[in-house]
Each structure stands twice: as structure tokens, then as C-alpha cells.
């Protein structure tokens, strides 16, 4: 059943983390598309599209090394969960602000930066957690499956966001 391509799925914890990561990453890509649409709708200025993307990515560049060091010294699971909780809180905050029609571009920019900071700690923790979930002989397969998960989500998320936005 788990031979060949899906061998790492024989490990229950890896399967759970893989499914959770895939779901989370699809949501992240959906939010990226919807958030860009919202930024442009509010501002009508392409500069803010770039600024939003920049503010979401610059913390990853600046803090991922620190996140990696901490992931090597602390509970990776706790770091990953905290990162996910922060990102979820930011998503709910943006949804609430949007629902009540009080969202401003600066809210989105601040939330993007906060999500970027959370990802700069969650990403290294996630990467460091994978080798602890599978046997050494299945690590390459687990890393390949992780790459598949990320790339599937990168395709599925924007498509779902586009469909959702088209229905609004």
C-alpha cells in the first residue's frame, strides 16, 4: 500500500502533518490571492500590492535564520503550532475587519508583516520536524512528498480563491 512513491505515508504522524500542511498552505495561497484583490480594491494603487508582498516576505528573509536556531533548541511542534495560531488569528482578524467593512490598507499591511514573522519561525520548525517523523531510510521520500504538497497547494489555492471571488 505504501510502497514506492508514498512510502513515507506509512508513518501516522507524517501523514497527519502532511495533510495539515497541505490544508494550511492551500488556505495561505487562497488568502494571498484574496488579500491582493482586497488591497487593490481598497487602494486602486499597484504600489500597495508590491508593498503587501514585500512586507509579507521580508520577515522571512530577516528572521528565518533565528527561527532555525530556535527550532533546533526548542520544541519544534510548539513553535509550529504557535506560528499556525498567529497566522490563523491574522486571517480571522482580516476576515472580521472585512465583514464589518472597516478594513483599511494599513491593517492588511500590518497583518502581512505579522504573518511573515510567524512564518519565519514556523517554516524552520516544520522543516526540522520532518526528519523526526520518518525513518532515515524514508527521509528523501518524505521531503519529496512535502515538496509535492507545497506545489499542489500553490496550484489549488489560487484556483479556489479565484472561484470564490468570482462567486462574490
Image (cartoon, rainbow, N blue to C red):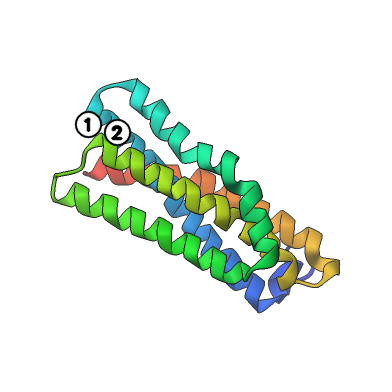
Q: Residues within 10 Å of mark 1 (few under 14, many from 20)?
A: few
Q: Is residue 94 depicted above or below 23 in this figure?
A: above
Q: Secondary structure beneath disc 1?
A: helix
Q: Is residue 7 above or below residue 112?
A: below
Q: Which residue bears the numbered disc 2? A: 39
SS of the residue at dot 2?
helix
x then y, percent, for residue 128: 69, 61
- In this view, the residue in front, 61 or 73, is 73
Question: Which picture quadrant has residue 46?
Answer: top left
Nearer to me, 62 or 108? 62
Residue in the image at 52% along x and 44% along y: 155
Quadrant of residue 126 within the rendered picture: bottom right
* Total numbered badges shown on the rendered structure: 2
From mark 1 to mark 2, how far is it between C-alphas?
5 Å
In the displayed structure, does residue 139 sit left or right of residue 55?
right
Is 30 placed above or below 15 here?
Answer: above
Q: Quadrant of residue 42?
A: top left
| Residue most extreme to the right | 137
Relative to residue 78, is residue 27 drawn left or right?
left
Residue 140, how many percent across, how many down?
80, 59
Amino acid at each position: 500500500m505504501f510502497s514506492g512513491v508514498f512510502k513515507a505515508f506509512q508513518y501516522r504522524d507524517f501523514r497527519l502533518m502532511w495533510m495539515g500542511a497541505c490544508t494550511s498552505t492551500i488556505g495561505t495561497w487562497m488568502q494571498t490571492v484574496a488579500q491582493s484583490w482586497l488591497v487593490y480594491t481598497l487602494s486602486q494603487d499597484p504600489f500597495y500590492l508590491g508593498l503587501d508582498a514585500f512586507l509579507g516576505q521580508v520577515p522571512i528573509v530577516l528572521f528565518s535564520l533565528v527561527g532555525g536556531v530556535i527550532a533546533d533548541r526548542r520544541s519544534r511542534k510548539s513553535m509550529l503550532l504557535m506560528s499556525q495560531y498567529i497566522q490563523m488569528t491574522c486571517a480571522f482578524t482580516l476576515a472580521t475587519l472585512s465583514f464589518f467593512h472597516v478594513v483599511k490598507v494599513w491593517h492588511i499591511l500590518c497583518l502581512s508583516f505579522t504573518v511573515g514573522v510567524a512564518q519565519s519561525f514556523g517554516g524552520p520548525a516544520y522543516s526540522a520536524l520532518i526528519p523526526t517523523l520518518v525513518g532515515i531510510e524514508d527521509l528523501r521520500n518524505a521531503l519529496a512528498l512535502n515538496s509535492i504538497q507545497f506545489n499542489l497547494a500553490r496550484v489549488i489555492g489560487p484556483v479556489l480563491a479565484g472561484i470564490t471571488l468570482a462567486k462574490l
